[in-house]
Image: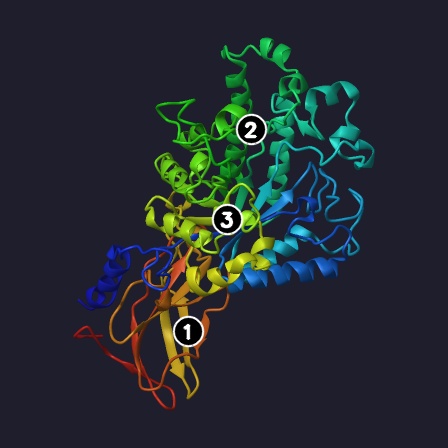
Amino acid sequence: MRFFTQYTLAFLIHFMWQPTLTQAQQPDEQIRDEMRGVWIATVANIDWPSAPGLSSKQQKAEFDSLLNVLKSMNMNAVFVQVRPTGDACYKSSLVPMSSFIVEKQGSPLDDSLYDPLAYMIKATHDRHMEFHAWFNPFRATWNLDTASLDARHPLRSLPEQRKAAWFFRYGKRWYFNPASSAVRQYLNNIVKDVLLRYDVDGIHFDDYFYPYKETGIDLEAALHDQEAFNNSGSAFTDIADWRRDNVSKLIETVSMTIKKYKPYVKFGISPFGVWRNKEQDPVNGSNTRAGVTCYDDLYADVLLWMKNDWIDYIAPQIYWSVGYLPADFKVLVDWWSTHTFGKQLYIGHAAYKINNAPNDVHWENPSEISKQIGVVRANNNVSGSVFYATKPLLLNTLGVKDSLMTVLYSAPSMMPAMPHLSKVTPSTASICRVMGNARVVQLTWALCELLSGDETPYYYALYRFDGAGIGSYKNPRNLLAITPFYTEKTYFEDDTAVEGEYYTYIITSFNRANVAGNPSDPVFLKKTKNGVRKKRKYWGYLF
């Protein structure tokens, strides 16, 4: 009976309480767990580092400063571009160091012990934020100057005949050819290298597959792939379907690699915001009039990838405003929310357009992002937001940082769980010691039982409820603290407890898929003048 009164009631409330969701204008009430992420672009030094060739000390300081601001805004994930243009923002024997990190592609860093990616991951995890490694898989160069490429870049190292099969030139850049099986294997090996050597939480691809068409430049002539299609032995009769299959083969291969080596790592895509217009697909298309579509122009069949369970989440770049007639933000959020095939959906917001979109006056309204988050939170099939890019947030354009920090994201939020990536739930923790003094309440906890390494918690969440009772776990005001990832510290000091007040504390463990273990037995106490007095009566039951 004692087990039931202490444990089962807490368990039932924890997992059965389903509070009403609210709009963006009511952030401190009942808000579900949500992704709050930002894309950090390294290409052209858009977000970080501020210039190529900075010292390791300067790069670290800039990244720490960036993270500190994001943390103050209660962001919980970063998507950092680690492969901007056929290069790397990390040490690698396969790929040269990016010219956006060092002054000349492939040049050594000033500190032989410094690895930008390793440093960024640790700095991010120390702030209890997820790190997703963002790859631009098919963009090979940023310009046509191949002479400045490092000798290890395949545009320099491969023989001419293989180069012709691996690359094509379009507009002002060189691209990897998705039709080449050797290219797809090469790209998979690059992802595998990062996956095995770095403690990333996710692998992330953006919207660049086959290139966006440029006015006045013939993509068909640049691809010059009709002969390859004819000789491919493919069952496809349409070259567009064959191109889509080329991209899909890479997605499937990368998915299999992740699942083989680190199945807890999330794999996600951030496609162009319009899959197809209704005019092109009356049955499945969205009610939009976009000049470009993901399926027809970029040859990316993202719905197939979700159907086949190759990816874990989708983050479409819905970079238009609420009410923009050709591609209305709300229309597209609703469309994607009914085409997720059970995958987690995050919405990509165009922070870079705030006060910077001449053809859409909605972006001059300081409340545009607030409206968009309201749309996101009103949709039960959407799990949060990701913003591109970081710099407009840091610059507080039209007060967006203030709005996020003080209204929209004024309290921390837990990451949405991905149960399909969880082998077992993490071991239950127990608050085993409660002490205090005039200043703080001191709590120590331990694991009740650990049967396997898969049950080892990745982090803990400590909840505090006013009075003798367990309130909503979804209310941010009840979330007292979240420990860093891989924490060995199972001790916390609550310096916000008020003398004379009664509180109930519960600790919950979480794994890498953000799946919660069973909550601990509740501890009920009174904060006194000199410390704490633990109460033994709870909900009318003695324990």
**Labels 1 & 2 near each other (Cβ < 8 A):** no
Relative depth, front residue between 251 and 28: 28
The front one of 543 and 294 is 294
Residue under label 3, please give it. Answer: 363
Q: Is residue 307 above or below residue 518?
A: above
Q: In this view, does 38 lie above or below 328?
A: below
Q: In the rendered image of this protein, does residue 201 appear above or below residue 183? A: below
User: Which-is-in-front pick, marks 1 and 2?
Assistant: 2
Labels 3, 1: front one: 3
Q: Which residue does the image show at 60% across and 33% down from the upper left? A: 188
- Check if mark 3's residue and mark 2's residue have beta carbons within 8 Å: no
Q: Mark 2 points at which residue?
A: 250
Q: Distance between the residues labelled 3 and 1?
A: 49 Å
> Which mark sits nearer the N-terminus, 3 or 1?
3
Measured as percent of width and height from the top left, residue 252 is found at 50, 29
The three-letter amino acid code for the residue at tag 2 is: Leu
- Crowd around label 3: few <14 · some 14–19 · many ≥20 (10 Å): many
Q: Which residue appears at 25% of the width and 75% of the height?
A: 468
Q: In which quarter of the image is the C terminus?
A: bottom left
Q: Which mark is residue 444?
A: 1
Q: Earlier in the sequence, mark 1 or mark 2?
A: 2
**Closer to viewer: mark 3 or mark 2:** 3
Which quarter of the picture shows residue 160?
top right
Q: What element carries label 2?
A: helix
The residue located at (39%, 48%) in the rendering is: 383
Looking at the rendered image, the quarter that the N terminus falls into is bottom left
Q: What residue type is labelled 3?
A: Trp
Horizontally, is 86 left or right of 293 in the view? right
From the viewer's perspective, is 538 left or right of 282?
Answer: left
Alpha carbons under labels 1 and 2: distance apart? 47 Å
